Amino acid sequence: MRLPHPRGPLSAAVIDVLRGGDPAALPQSFDAPDDALIDDDLQLALWTMYELHYRGFEGVSDRWEWEPRLIQLRNQLEAVLLTALRAMVVVPADARRVADRLRGLVEADDGPSLSRYMQTRADRSQWLEFVAHRSIYQLKEADPHTWAVPRLPVKAKAALLEIQLDEYGGGNPALMHSELFRGVLAELGLRTEHGGYIDVVPGITLAITNVMSMFGLNRALRGALVGHLAAYEMTSSEPCRRYAKGLRRIGGSDAACVFYDVHVTADALHEQLAAHDLCGGLAEAEPELTEDIVFGAAVCLAVDARFAAHVLDSWAAGASSLRTADDSLLAVS
Ligand SMILES: [Fe+2]
Ligand SMILES: [Fe+2]
């Protein structure tokens, strides 16, 4: 993919290095933003550095992945983001089993329902926006959680692999969930390449993937990573049923809707595996990670709620939820 356009001094400095600039020019310190979760510059800087660990960028050397000064800046930005998340999400002490605590969190979640809106009210242009947002994560669906595989004890590892095998299409490239999502983009006439909408999505959309990457790339946060996955799976099946209905309502074909259709059944199973075998298995083997597991789940729900509120509030105000109101940016070039 192409390098994104910078959004401020942090992302500009990172992108400049990747274009061949001097890493010594990276900022040694910076003022923490008021709201790290939605800060365009911080989120894009992090997203760009994380991408070096995934597919990288066209014309950018793979060797930048472990450049010490980039890693140092990444650590600093992660500390700011993690502090913001810990302040945003307070997890009360609770003696119940971890699976029951996760279920309790999901049942108490009262975030705005984007899926209900998409099912019953969203028009075609709102669907285009929604899918453009989602493309940032969905085109590498499951990849951030895969970082956990070598870090888990046996029972939890087996559960994660069972989930991930489905996410990756059981070995069939056409059934890989990221590929099924590419079908949604294609049907709606949108760009299908990874990161095609990176320049038009706001900080909160980047934060959704950044949080997963941060949890995934730091072994110390493996508890939060599997908790995050559990909450993701536990809040997927029913919303995907609504998304499928909404996409069909605006004329989506069965071939395009298959991305949502498969998640209705797959995630009904994945949520059990994730809560009981993955999170339960990790908490059993490493009980000191229990609070982090619950923290990761709570973060997943809170960040998703913030994203949904951003999209729905933008639309309620008659505005675009993207960084530009120029719909032509949604067209395939
Ligand atoms: Fe999936
Ligand atoms: Fe799943």
Image (cartoon, rainbow, N blue to C red):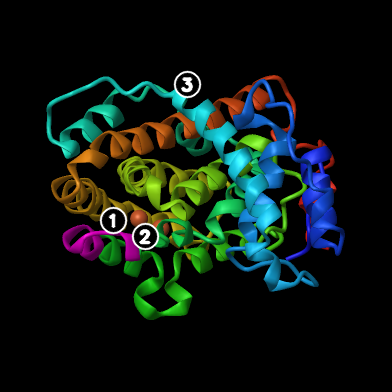
Any mark on residue 265, and which?
A: 1
Task: Looking at the picture, tell me which residue is in the foreground, 213 or 165.
Answer: 213
Mark 3 sits on what residue? 87
Amino acid of disc 3: Ala
Secondary structure category for the residue under label 1: helix
The residue range painted magenta reads 150-159
Name the chief secondary structure element in magenta: helix
Q: Position of residue 27 (x, y in %)?
A: 78, 41
Secondary structure category for the residue under label 3: helix
Badge nearest the viewer, 3 or 2: 3
Task: Looking at the picture, tell me which residue is in the foreground, 195 or 94.
Answer: 94
Residue at image point 21% right, 50% down: 282
Q: Residues within 10 Å of mark 1 (few under 14, many from 20)?
A: some
Mark 2 sits on what residue? 262
Between the residue at mark 1 and the residue at mark 2, the CA separation in whole angstroms equals 6 Å
Badge nearest the viewer, 3 or 1: 3
Amino acid of disc 1: Thr
Residue at image point 51% right, 43% down: 211
Amino acid of disc 2: Val
Residue at image point 13% right, 35% down: 97
Q: Are marks 1 and 2 in contact (CB under 8 Å)?
A: yes
Sequence-wise, the earlier of marks 3 and 1 is 3
Task: Looking at the picture, tell me which residue is in the foreground, 266 or 12.
Answer: 12
Q: Is residue 158 magenta?
A: yes
Ligand 1 within 8 Å of disc 2? The answer is: yes
Task: Looking at the picture, tell me which residue is in the foreground, 94 or 321.
Answer: 94
Ligand 2 within 8 Å of disc 1? The answer is: no
Up/down of 243 relative to 36, above or below: below
Q: Residues within 10 Å of mark 2 (few under 14, many from 20)?
A: some
